[in-house]
Image (cartoon, rainbow, N blue to C red):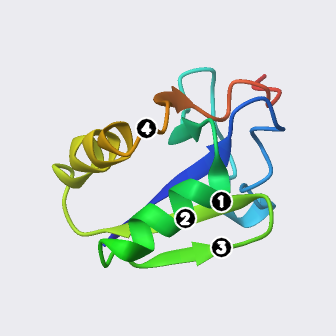
Amino acid sequence: MGVLPVLQRGRDLTLCLSNDDLPNFYMEDYSVLGLLVANLDQTHRVLVGKDFSVDKNGDYLKVKIDRSEQMPEIVKLLSLNGIDCTMADIVDQIYQG
């Protein structure tokens, strides 16, 4: 089972990353795929309403997924509910040297 981080667009993208999540050695090609949304609270309501397992941690969500096909399903579900969302690399602001 994996976790898809979901963050409010325009906020600090590293909010959901703890030091424990980062490998000891990583290079510039390290990335974490996440979802940026226009309205985090509405996103939470829609996902919970469709029985997704969602942990809300203040400024971000962690959506549990069982298979990679669920990511485009989530994007489609949010779009159908009027929520603008984009897949993005959420570690592009971390120093990678």
- The reply to whether the C-beta atoms of the residues labelled 2 and 3 are less than 8 Å apart is yes
Q: Is residue 62 left or right of residue 60?
A: left
Badge 2 is on which residue?
Answer: 44
Which residue is drawn at the image coordinates 77% and 61% (left, top)?
18
Mark closest to the chain's N terminus, 2 or 4:
2
- Disc number for residue 86: none
Secondary structure of the residue carrying numbered label 3? strand
Badge 1 is on which residue?
Answer: 41
Secondary structure of the residue carrying numbered label 2? helix
Mark closest to the chain's N terminus, 3 or 4:
3
Which residue is drawn at the image coordinates 84% and 38% (left, top)?
12
Q: Amino acid at mark 4?
A: Gly
Asked if residue 30 is positioned above or below residue 81 in the image, the reply reads: above
Tell me the quarter of the picture where residue 49 sits.
Answer: bottom left
- The reply to whether the C-beta atoms of the residues labelled 2 and 1 are less than 8 Å apart is yes
Badge 4 is on which residue?
Answer: 82
- Disc number for residue 56: 3
